[in-house]
Amino acid sequence: MSKFVRKFVLLAVSLVTVMGVVAHATPSKAAKTVVTWFVGLGTGTNEQQIDVQNKVVENFNKSHDDIELKINIAASNQAAPAALGTLIASGNAPDIVGPVGFSGANLFSGQWLDLGPLVEKSKYDMKQFPESLVNLYMEDGKLVGIPFAVFPGLIYVNKDLFDEAGLEYPPAKFDDAKTGVSKYKLDGKEVDWDWDTVAEISKRLTVDANGKDATDAAFDPTKIEQFGFIHQWDTIRSDFSTFGGAPVVDASGKVAIPENWRDEAKWMKAMLWDNHSMPSATYSASDLLKPHEFGSGKVAMARVMLWYTCCLADMKANWDLGVMPSYKGQVYAPTDADTFRVHKDTKNPDAAFTVLSYLLGDAALDLLKTYGGYPARPDLQDQLIKAFSEKYPSVKNWDLVAPSLNFTAAPGHEANFPNFNKGQLRFNDFRTMLYGDTGKDMDVDKELDKLQEDLQKIVEEEPAPMPTEAPPTAEATEAQ
């Protein structure tokens, strides 16, 4: 073998050896951590929302080399509980579920991860949210959610009906930053804007076919053509919470209907059957109040959540917003709230929290717009209010929405308790009795005692199992 050939062979061997060492020393590219996102337990299943959500997934994956986000969208909101239950029961629980409100999340009680340690580890800024709002997501000392889309309770005001009655509009701001108590001018005197004041002006705003209001001895409650007030489109627990939030079950497992809830139930009975200034179930179902009570233009004030704004595009009357009234020197605003939950069995909690932070962060505005939610994040609120202002030019008081969150009633009106769904149905039975003709002669305390007794039995029953079988139409669709 010639010297040249020997040198070439030695060089080749050396090169192969070096390449082998380099190849051995260079690690292969790490596989991405997969995080799954289940949609449908709340909103998110209509076509427009699906497109936006898929774009969020695409943008996340483009911006993250170490995590791959996959989305699983249920066929419908109705099918979602069974679809999710099946995934959990089979050991394939998604990492993230949402957006979802409390009622949907409560179907899967005990399934949600405590986010507290991850919030602390990542230094996620929780101080940007009012403490009362964060408290909605505290369950047994654990943080199970971070505020995202919120809908505080407000007073919707028909300004035309107030003008006809010669009454001042409800206050447009909270006078006391701590209690929320505001003042109202009635008959030339300054009074607290509380539920007693609401009751008084509601009588003046309730009018029969002969033009008599509910303060007139000649008023005919069988021929009412205009009402002063309504608690609209909500549960009785939400109505109760306007006088203060309370747990259904205390730490010892006992159910107690608190005094503030009893006061509110008696207030409602008086409004319905003594003052006749709030529509009963019969009136609410009548042609008079179509398409819906406040939207009919025949109700002067409605206490309802902010999401109701979506239903007023065709309302001809001039309307605006007012602050919540106070009870015993404190304002309480029941608040609906949707967010994303992390499943307790996630194998990748850090990666799941990275995705969660993205949904609540960079993707938040696009998602809030498609979900129709008001941002819990203060830095996003002005952008949504601008859109509201353009759509509803008669509304001037949008700036009271954010401060209302400072008075969120907690525990919330959808706070979980054992056998939640069955218990909620029993609460609804009480509401049906109060608003129906049976409410006229109702002994409120007696019926609340019966409610308390029945709820105690319900919470002590064997918990209802979560749904685990999806019907044929409930197959989840996966979008990559």
Image (cartoon, rainbow, N blue to C red):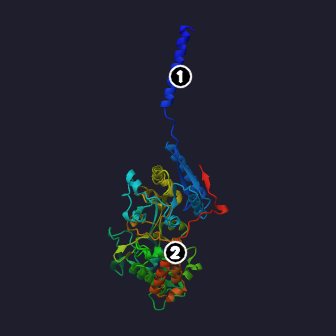
Dot 2 alpha-carbon crowd within 10 angstroms: few under 14, some 14 to 19, many 20 or more: few
The residue to which callout 1 is attached is 16
Horizontal and vertical percent position of residue 372: 51, 61
Horizontal and vertical percent position of residue 428: 52, 77
Q: Is residue 440 above or below residue 54?
A: below
- The N terminus: image quadrant: top right
Q: Residue at x 54, y 86 (%)?
A: 437
Residue 152 falls in which quadrant of the image?
Answer: bottom left
The residue to which callout 2 is attached is 461
Name the amino acid, label 2: Glu
User: Is there a contact, CB below 8 Å, between mark 2 and mark 1?
Assistant: no
Give how far apart the Cα atoms at labels 2 and 1 are. 73 Å
Seen as rendered, the residue at the extreme top is 2
Front-most of residues 207 and 26: 26
First in sequence: mark 2 or mark 1? 1
Name the amino acid, label 1: Val
Front-most of residues 342 and 208: 342
Give the SS element for disc 1.
helix
Q: Is residue 399 above or below residue 283?
A: above
Q: Residue at x 54, y 67 (%)?
A: 311
| Residue 399 in view, yes or no | no
* Residue 118, numbered label: none
